[in-house]
Amino acid sequence: MEIKNKVIAIAGLFLSAFSFAQSDVVINVVGERKVEHATRIPIHPKVIDTNVNVVGVDYPLLALRMETQTEIDRINPATVKTSDKLAQLYHSYIKLGIGTELMPLGEFYYNSERSRKYVYGAHIKHLSSLGYINGYAPASFDRTRSMIYGGINETRWDLLGEVNYNNRGLNYYAIPVDTIARDSIAQRYSDFGMSVRYRSHIKDSAKVNYSIGATYRNFMSKKPLQDSLKDWRARENYVGVNGSVFYKLNKETYALDIDVLNNAYRYGIADTSISLLDTGLVLNNTVVSLKPTITTRLKDNRFSAKIGVDLTLDAHTKTRFYIYPLAEVKYSMFNDIFIPYVGLRGGLQQNTFRSLTMMNEFIIPNVQLENTSTAIDFYGGIKGTLSKRVNFNLSASFANVKNQALFVNDTVYANGNAFSVIYDTITSRTTLEGSVSYQMMEKLKVDGIARFYSYALLNNSYAWNLPQLEFVVRGSYDLFNKFIVNLDLKMEHGRKALLYAEEEGSFKENNQIVKDLGFIADANLSLEYRYNKRISAFVQLNNFAAQRYKRWYNAPVHGFQVMGGITFRF
């Protein structure tokens, strides 16, 4: 009721005010109005969802097929225009010549031309001399080499094989008597070999690359004149298997090299002899080497470090096991201008009768074979390029070598005109070497090498027949692609020979008789004139300094020789 009274009062005041403004209007309000009480609806709001059913519509599959055609535009291969053309290749090359002292020369090459997949060829060369050295036994010789090879190059692998046969004839002419019969001092080496190698080169970095190869060689000396003594010559069978596996992961390369080498040497019949000084000798030599290494490259390949170990088993007269270090660090400075390097290495060298004859072909056929072990060799140096045409290398190494092969004149089996092999330990071998090369395109090439050796031996006063100083100079000059000049110069100094009797110019040191072999200067010069691309003529001057130096004690070399001939390409 209070609300009702307030409403009536307000209305009364409003009408009163209005009545003052409109004095002639009178409004009377009579009665009362009832207002119902408000009530709260006890219902909560909620969402009412209505599901609408969708009627499915089926579309029938029409049996229609639209024919479409696709046309691909042909893209022509890119071409590179250049004024330079690849030099024309020829299948065959023949070189024929004749020299003073009745020295014929014949050489033949046959090669495949350019091919992405196949490579094959053959090579035969013969050089002989019927000349004499004044005051010495007949010094004639002949050398014949032959080889055939073939290979397949695929995208992910390649295969290469080779078969060769070499034949060398010579005389033990180191006798200052020119009346000795040639047959009594003759020697001949027969060398047959074959090899095969398979190598993968997968570019995928997640794959492992590997290579495997095998080599076989049969090497024999001359058979004695008497058929009853046919077994009394040196015979050697060599079998070698080598493999390599490497894997690149990020900046590291993991590699493993495996070598298994077996050499069977036989002279005469074991446990028998044909004289008090000539007994049979049978030696089997097996070397197994395992070389795991890790190489890392940093600083955009400017820094390279390699570390590993060489685990070698030497099964010879005694079975020995060696562990050699393998480590090298080098760093490229100023864009390969200077590359300093330092390293530590070692290894076992298997000496065979064949390898010894390659160093000194005048050795006796019954030699003792020992393997040479370089226990440690610490080396370092710096190499680089002084310009686009000049590069250099300066190095030094310090090594300890066991069973170093040395050649001395044999006075037991031979009359001093042949050489036997002795072995000694070089407790310290220092080698200093410097080389420089210059090349101006294909026009001028010059190489120079200088080496200094210092030896300290355990049992001998000197490293017999090894030089202390060595200089090598090689060069070639192409004038207008018409005249080709080649120079080959080799100089040695400081070689000493071991004697068993005193003679003029010899001296004693540590109860050993020593002879200085003097200075060696061997210079060869050749000139080739190219008439056209297929035919040329040449003149070669051998030992043009005309120095009859002694490469081995009491064995002077041939003097000045002139050889001329022609060449053909077709």
Image: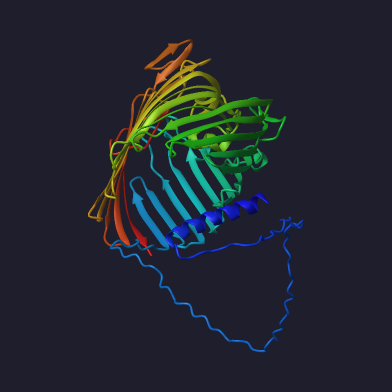
Residue at left offset 59%, top offset 86%: 66
Q: Is residue 130 above or below residue 175?
A: below
Q: Residue furthest bottom?
A: 63
- Decide if residue 553 is in sight here: no
Residue most extreme to the left: 480
Return the residue nearer the eye: 44 or 561: 44
Q: Quadrant of residue 567?
A: bottom left
Residue 322 in the image, given as x and y percentages of width and height: 63, 26
Left or right? Give the position of 307 relative to 43: left
User: Which of the colour schemes (rainbow, by chain, secondary structure, one colour) is used?
Assistant: rainbow
User: In the rendered view of the protein, which quadrant contains the C terminus?
Assistant: bottom left
Q: How many marks?
A: 0
Between 210 and 103, the one nearer to me in the picture: 210
Residue 214's place in the image compared with 406, above or below, is below
Q: Residue 343, percent across and down?
A: 48, 27
Residue 19 visible (yes or no): yes
- Choose top left, top right, bottom left or bottom right for residue 12: bottom right
**What is the quadrant of residue 236 in the picture?**
top right
Q: Position of residue 485 (x, y in %)?
A: 27, 47
Front residue (pair 569, 160): 160
Q: What residue is at 72 percent from the left and 29 percent from the top? A: 271
Left-right relation of 404 to 290: left
Q: Position of residue 537 (x, y in %)?
A: 29, 56
Residue positioned 60% across, 49% down in the render: 207
Residue positioned most to the right: 42
Q: Is residue 13 left or right of residue 215?
A: left
Name the residue furthest top.
Answer: 510
Q: Nearer the viewer, residue 11 or 292?
A: 11
